[in-house]
Amino acid sequence: MAVTFHDLGSDAGLKKLDEYLLPRSYISGYQASKDDIIVHSSLPKPPSPQYVNVSRWYNHIDALLRISGVSAEGCGVVVEGSAPVTEAVATPPVEDSKAAAAEEDDDDDVDLFGEETEEEKKAAEERAAAMKAKAKKKESGKSSVLLDVKPWDDETDMKKLEEAVRGVQMEGLLWGASKLVAVGYGIKKLQIMMTIVDDLVSVDTLIEEHLTVEPINEYVQSCDIVAFNKICK
């Protein structure tokens, strides 16, 4: 199936091409082909280094054209918004090929594979990690949790207890409504709602490492989960 690209002379077109090349070395298949020649020739000028994947691919194809040319047919590619590319561009002029061959004899260090620099590799890895994190965050579910927070005795300042509980802040945690519920013998407990992002907050960890340790345990004797409900996938 032919691949289509649009207006490769614009930032939007280069951005799309950069995203397309993120997991790929070539426009199609596992070797350089005429598809790469067509796209390469459609670029009005070498791409800016900010387009890491396009720049890597462009330099690689440019090196191949200068040295050995590209003969594989490819799967077909269409570039809209630029001048049509003829078959002739697939093979470098004879003079250029001879000159390139002579240079190859004198220099065995020519990089035929367009090897990435450390900066390009790091940028590509960071981009891939960011995309993966964004996708994971988008898919993460949420839950609504009701907690019972119990004081030590009837002399515990419940206002300060609630302030201490709400003072626990972390990514993926949102405190909601609360109320005091009588337990007996003048003792009241705090019932408080919270919404959590499942992949970011563990309720057990929240209780064990944040709500029942110093300095909050000056007011809180224990915490129990009363209700735990999924609110979205």
Image (tube, rainbow, N blue to C red):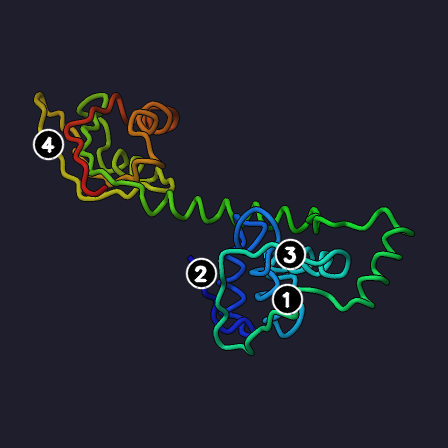
- Residue occupied by mark 2: 2
Q: Distance between the residues labelled 4 and 2?
A: 67 Å
Residue 218 visible? The answer is no
For disc 3, the marked residue is 71
Real-space Cα separation, disc 3 to disc 4, in angstroms: 79 Å
| Amino acid on which the number 4 mark rests in the picture | Val
Q: What element carries label 1?
A: loop
Where residue 55 is drawn, which disc sits there? none
Residue 47: image tag: 1
Location of mark 4 (residue): 181
Secondary structure, mark 2, is loop
Q: Is 3 placed left or right of 218 in the picture?
A: right
Kind of residue at badge 3: Ser
- The quadrant in which residue 193 appears is top left
Q: Establish if 96 lies above or below 132.
A: below
Residue 231 or residue 32, whichever sits in front? 32
Side of 144 relative to 182 (left or right): right
